[in-house]
Image: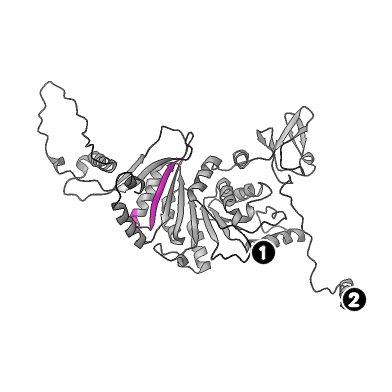
Amino acid sequence: MSGLFRALRKALGFSKAPKRAILPIRDLAKFAEGERVLVDGLKLSAPLQKNGSSNYKNGLLPHNDIIGKPLSSFYIRGPKGIYKIDAPTLDDYVSLTPRLVTPVYANYASSIVSLLDIHPIPWTDEKSPVSSPLEILEAGTGHGSLTLHISRAIAAANPPPLNIPVPQYQKNESQQPEPALETGVRQAWSEWKQSRRAILHTVEKVEANRWHAEKIVRGYRQGLYWPHVDFYAGDASTWIQAQSTQRKLSTWNPFASTSEDGFLDYVLLDMPGVHTQLQYVSGAMRDGAKVVVFTPSVTQIGECAKAIQDSNLPLVMERVLELGEGISTGRRWDVRMVMPRKHKDRSKPSTTEPVAGVEMDKEPPQIDSNEDDDSIVEKAALEALGDRLPEEQPDEPVMICRPLVGERTMGGGFIALFKKISPESAAIAAEWRRGQTGWAKKRNR
């Protein structure tokens, strides 16, 4: 009888559960509409469209001959020759997609992600214990290339992505009402995002760049890494304040020592005036969290070191690397503030009198073989100041920026890794460093 009543309710339209729209299924192992393919290993095609085509040197290339094919190399015969079709690598995709700003190329992005040393807990099931999700802030989305690399690094921490397409790219949400099918797609992805255990928040101040970056991320492998990223337009400090208010956290105290006062595990800063943002992001970081700054010049890294010292921020510099052609994993630099040592005999007049008519050569500075590199650099910095630092004037810190080791190279940028550390841990670490000698002292400055 119960089966009869269910059939009657369904026939009369009295079914309790509303019928959900059947959502389209995506196959990540095959080329689909909206993707770009690599043509002849040189050019990136326009987004594939059903019944569309692209025109190259060998004539029209029909998109229908590509859509639905497996993600492997194959050939298509055109009117004037043969085309080779490949799935673009992430490096190809970043380098060849249209741009509004210069992208972070794959070799640089890989170095940055490797420096962060991200190890998210892999997803097993919904019942696996996780205290709080791993959260990353990327301030300065730019082209979206670094966004793709980071989201790929954290993808394993989240549940398997849905087998439905990502929502359509919609810059203006006040457009005409979207179809019911698209509404169902957005709702399904919104529910999926609630179970994420690793999230990349990317904030871009220039709104045009923010939307273009999301378009770039959506266009790679049918939006394979888009679900792991939340995009925002605005200033990073404003975003942090809004998140702090929403979460009801006291993240504006940069010296908070408990993990409950912060929510960020990693921070990447790639923007002008990066040193001005450290005081904001340090307050939103958990104890032990890492922050990486990416700058075109080493002097900007020095500004970050000076800002940390001037504002007494709970950040300690772990490493500074120079990126560029010919550098595999980055050339290490020594960037820090030092206090030059005074020389008591510096103000004494010279006892050597010049002889009339005879030009005397200046003797090179004598270097004590027992002195370490720090003493030599501090002495050189003091001598460079000359009479501007008299004996009775208190010492002022001097910035050191020099390569630790390496060869002459060209191009690239600089990245610096900082780590948040509590005042108690900082005091113990300073005492530990004072006990180091030799190469151990240089490695743990």
197 lies above or below 377: below
Residue at the (21%, 51%) spot, across then down: 394
Identify the colour scheme used.
Answer: one colour
Q: Is residue 322 magenta?
A: yes
Q: Check disc 2: other Cα within 10 Å, few if <14, some if 14-19, many if 20+.
A: few
Q: Is residue 217 visible?
A: yes
Using the image, tell me which numbered label, if any, was put on residue 191: 1
Q: Amino acid at mark 2?
A: Leu
> Residues at badges 2 and 1 in contact (C-beta under 8 Å)?
no
Magenta segment, which residues? 309-330
Residue at disc 1, secondary structure: helix
> Foreground residue, 413 or 143?
413
Residue at the (31%, 52%) spot, across then down: 433
In percent of width and height, residue 415 lies at 45, 45
Work out which quarter of the rendered image holds the N terminus and state it.
bottom right
In-image side of 189 versus 19 (left or right): left
> Foreground residue, 25 or 184?
25
Q: Amino acid at mark 1?
A: Glu
**Residue pointed to by mark 2:** 4
> Foreground residue, 57 or 400?
400
> Foreground residue, 71 or 439?
439
In percent of width and height, residue 425 lies at 36, 60
| Residue 66 image-quadrant placement | top right
Q: Earlier in the sequence, mark 2 or mark 1?
A: 2
In-image side of 411 versus 95 (left or right): left
35 lies above or below 265: above
65 lies above or below 2: above
Q: CA distance from mark 2 to mark 1?
A: 34 Å
In percent of width and height, residue 321 lies at 43, 43
